[in-house]
Amino acid sequence: MRVNEIFYSLQGEGFYSGTPAVFVRFSGCNLKCSFCDTRHDDYADMTEDEIMYEVSKYPACHIVITGGEPALQITASLVGRLHAAGKYVQMETNGTSRLPADCGVDWITCSPKYRPVRLEHIDELKVIFQSSEQDMSVYDRYTAAVYSLQPCDVGDAKVNARILKEAVEYCLAHPKWRLSLQTHKMLDIR
Ligand SMILES: C[S@@+](CC[C@H](N)C(=O)[O-])C[C@H]1O[C@@H](n2cnc3c(N)ncnc32)[C@H](O)[C@@H]1O
Ligand SMILES: Nc1nc2[nH]cc(C(=O)O)c2c(=O)[nH]1
Ligand code: SF4
Ligand SMILES: [Mg+2]
């Protein structure tokens, strides 16, 4: 499997914010979002054994499978092995690729981009919020347990502050949505 990095940190985003987690970041993505905050091109080829060994070095049971786009590489076999090791598996995905049959991921956080979502089930819908002008009606078609609104980090403090203010206003006016802050960036951790 093409792995960009494996590291231990706090889940910085969404419903599980603050949860200690081992991040497995797969390399490569089928999209090129202009705002993407992650460099994921570099990789090492790793076997499932090697991934399991790396993950076993950390004490947390929460695993975040991300990328790049992890749906392009995830296997039921790897998820099964993580479960056998007592792990809880969350995946961060853009939702454009179907998951392998019986993939078994415990929590799917889907952050739709500008392409149709092909997932049958979403636990958390995480929308990247850029402006109060954004058409939020496109998300009406999705059903999830949790609806997270995450301000887009555009790399400019003034613009970020404007986006954050509008995101707060949006949540207050549409309380189905909860604010998701990228807390790892505030804490300056990975
Ligand atoms: C790097 S992506 C990897 C997973 C998957 N490709 C996806 O887009 O969901 C991880 C999360 O970061 C979010 N994200 C990426 N760039 C961002 C930015 N500039 N500001 C806020 N969130 C961002 C994505 O929407 C996604 O929820
Ligand atoms: N701490 C931390 N939390 C995260 N949650 C989702 C991330 C991602 O890049 O998918 C991420 C990340 O890169 N770091
Ligand atoms: S889908 Fe995710 S990883 Fe891919 S470019 Fe967009 S934000 Fe980045
Ligand atoms: Mg990230």
Image (cartoon, grey):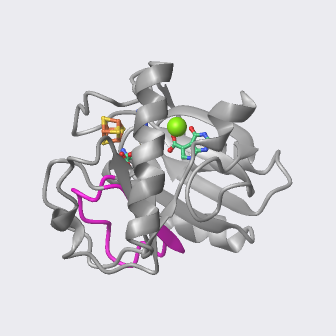
Residue furthest out toward the right: 59
Compared to 25, does 20 lie above or below? below
Q: Residue at x 45, y 74 (%)?
A: 175
The chief SS type of the magenta part is loop
Q: Is residue 137 visible?
A: yes
Tell me which corner region of the image, top left, top right, bottom left or bottom right, holds residue 103: bottom left
Nearer to us in this view, 93 or 83: 93
Residue 72 position in % (x across, y down):
31, 49
Q: Is residue 60 left or right of residue 48?
A: right
Compared to 71, does 67 lie above or below? above
Quadrant for the N terminus in the image:
top left
Q: Is residue 184 left or right of residue 176?
A: right
Q: Residue at x 39, y 23 (%)?
A: 41
Residue 3 position in % (x across, y down):
50, 35
Quadrant for the C terminus in the image:
top right
Compared to 61, does 123 lie above or below? below
Q: Is residue 97 left or right of residue 108?
A: left
Residue 112 position in % (x across, y down):
27, 55
Q: How many marks?
A: 0
Residue 89 position in % (x across, y down):
59, 65
Q: Is residue 152 visible?
A: no
Tell me which corner region of the image, top left, top right, bottom left or bottom right, holds residue 189: top right
Nearer to us in this view, 62 or 129: 129
- The magenta stretch is 94-111
Q: Is residue 187 left or right of residue 73?
A: right
Q: Quadrant of ligand 3?
A: top left
Q: Is residue 174 magenta?
A: no
Q: Is residue 105 magenta?
A: yes
